[in-house]
């Protein structure tokens, strides 16, 4: 048994002897390197998810309609941000390669040009979302009892898109060099600001006005502003690997832009497929009614905790894979990818039992509605099983994105998220009559499908040969 466990964990057995290019560091050292990069991102994601859950709890005190109104804005907001998120995938991949090549100027050139693009795009997207907020919420499936609240919340959130977008781009570059602590600090402080002003503005405590849903949106924007200020501070000073100065060359050059576009365009295609799938998925559930959508929103908040661990490992894998490929060590890139998968599986085992036995209690933290808690406990059982596929597939996807193999992840998203998940969700929710529980069976099948497809791609090793 010990021998089997050793072969499973030991990095010496993760690649064939013929694939080794140089010396493989000790297993403990590789796991430490992965943990060193992953823990800030994982902690950041977990705490941000917890704070988001607290956010939902605070809004939940206003009733299921408020939860649904805030929740239904999520997918439209991410659709608006999809171009920025796509850009950031390219930024992380390019900066990681330049870090591996020890090309500091190339990394900073990428940062400067991506900041210009991010700022310009975010202003246009912000204006679009603000002007058409009513139409966007109606198309998202907002029912008559929540559409006014949802539109107001969305309109305020759009004001903060610029601050959010530029902050995300800076953090994407920092992750490329393995500096995940910056992103952790900015997001934690920003979300702390969000919670404080939620308390002050939602119910009007300590003499502040009672703004309800609008107060929650204003608190989010204030958090975004604080996060951007901290992110900018992290790149001021020439003693840092990533830094900006006014005197630097801010003009665009073909090589840098083409590298960002090469990865970012494929990432954009992936984001489009993801967001269409997520949007249709949410709209199908919204059609079940306000209580069903509120149940789904609470379950999504809880599940985001399990996703957070996988997301942290995914970010670490993306950074380390990119750096190793830049250093001409595809063997080490493969090993880091497999180490991330094993760490994800170990975490999934713990989360499985938490969701399995504590699902009903977790739901009771968000609402005292007995019917919602009863349905939520069933959803958490499905979530406990889904968690294994979810955490593993996001780590593998991170490896592929870090290598620049974003076109393949885009095709996977098209097949699984845009086509399979919505079709199965509609089938399970309506013709079969399973309601919101059926939507989570669709989610389980989607995650499993993505795991299978991405794992098959990872095993071929073709992603290690992509040039950036």
Image (cartoon, grey):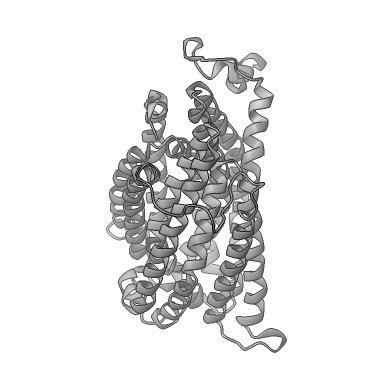
448 vs 247, nearest the viewer: 247
Task: Give the left or right position of residue 71, taking residue 283 as reference.
Answer: right
Residue 92 is situated, as x and y percent measured from the top left of the image, at 49, 44
**Relative to 107, residue 171 above or below:** below
Outermost residue to the front = 247
The residue depicted at 59 percent of the width and 41 percent of the height is 178
Above or below, comparing residue 244 to residue 397 in the picture: below
Residue located at (33% from left, 73% from top): 136
Q: Residue at x 60, y 45 (%)?
A: 351
Residue 455 shown left or right of residue 23 in the figure: left
Q: Is residue 64 visible?
A: yes
The picture places residue 363, in percent across and down from the top left corner, at 58, 62
Q: Quadrant of the N terminus?
A: top right
Residue at 39% x, 63% y is 121
Q: Looking at the picture, how far across and down is residue 55, in whole percent?
A: 59, 69
In the picture shown, does residue 54 fall above or below 235? Answer: below
Q: How many marks?
A: 0
Quadrant location of the C terminus in the rendered image? top left
- In the displayed structure, does residue 242 sit left or right of residue 160? right
The answer to whether residue 81 is left or right of residue 56 is: left
Q: Nearer the viewer, residue 178 or 63?
A: 178
Residue farthest to the right, as pictured: 206
Asked whether residue 361 is in view, the answer is no
Q: Nearer the viewer, residue 363 or 318?
A: 318
Q: Position of residue 373 (x, y in %)?
A: 55, 64
With respect to residue 337, does 50 lie above or below? below
């Amino acid at each position: 048994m010990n021998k089997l466990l050793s072969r499973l964990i030991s990095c010496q057995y993760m690649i064939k002897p013929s694939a080794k290019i140089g010396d493989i560091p000790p297993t403990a050292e590789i796991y430490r390197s992965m943990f060193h990069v992953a823990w800030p991102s994982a902690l950041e994601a977990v705490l941000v998810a917890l704070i988001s859950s607290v956010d939902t709890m605070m809004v939940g005190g206003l009733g299921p309609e408020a939860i649904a109104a805030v929740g239904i804005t999520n997918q439209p907001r991410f659709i608006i941000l999809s171009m920025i998120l796509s850009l950031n995938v390219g930024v992380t991949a390019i900066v990681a390669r330049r870090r591996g090549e020890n090309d500091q100027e190339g990394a900073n050139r990428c940062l400067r040009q991506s900041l210009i693009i991010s700022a310009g795009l975010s202003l246009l997207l912000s204006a679009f979302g603000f002007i058409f907020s009513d139409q966007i919420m109606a198309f998202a499936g907002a029912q008559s009892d929540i559409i006014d609240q949802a539109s107001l919340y969305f309109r305020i959130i759009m004001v903060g898109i610029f601050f959010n977008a530029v902050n995300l781009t800076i953090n994407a570059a920092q992750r490329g060099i393995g500096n995940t602590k910056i992103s952790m600090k900015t997001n934690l402080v920003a979300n702390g600001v969000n919670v404080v002003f939620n308390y002050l503005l939602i119910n009007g405590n300590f003499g502040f006005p009672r703004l309800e849903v609008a107060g929650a949106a204003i608190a989010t924007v204030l958090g975004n502003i604080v996060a951007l200020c901290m992110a900018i501070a992290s790149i001021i000073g020439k003693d840092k690997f990533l830094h900006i100065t006014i005197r630097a060359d801010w003009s665009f050059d073909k090589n840098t832009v083409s590298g960002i576009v090469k990865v970012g365009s494929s990432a954009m295609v992936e984001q489009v497929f993801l967001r269409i799938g997520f949007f249709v998925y949410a709209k199908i559930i919204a059609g079940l009614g306000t209580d069903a959508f509120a149940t789904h929103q609470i379950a999504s908040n809880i599940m985001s905790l399990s996703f957070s661990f996988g997301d942290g490992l995914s970010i670490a894998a993306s950074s380390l894979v990119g750096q190793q490929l830049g250093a001409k060590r595809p063997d080490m890139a493969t090993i880091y990818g497999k180490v991330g998968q094993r760490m994800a599986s170990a975490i999934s085992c713990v989360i499985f039992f938490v969701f399995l036995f504590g699902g009903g209690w977790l739901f009771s933290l968000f609402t005292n509605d007995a019917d919602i808690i009863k349905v939520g406990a069933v959803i958490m059982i499905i979530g406990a099983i889904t968690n294994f596929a979810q955490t593993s597939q996001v780590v593998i996807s991170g490896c592929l994105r870090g290598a620049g193999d974003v076109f393949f992840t885009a095709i996977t998203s098209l097949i699984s998220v845009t086509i399979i998940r919505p079709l199965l969700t509609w089938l399970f929710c309506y013709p079969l009559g399973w309601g919101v529980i059926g939507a989570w069976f669709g989610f389980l099948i989607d995650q499993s499908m993505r795991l299978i497809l991405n794992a098959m791609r990872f095993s071929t090793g073709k992603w290690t040969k992509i040039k950036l």
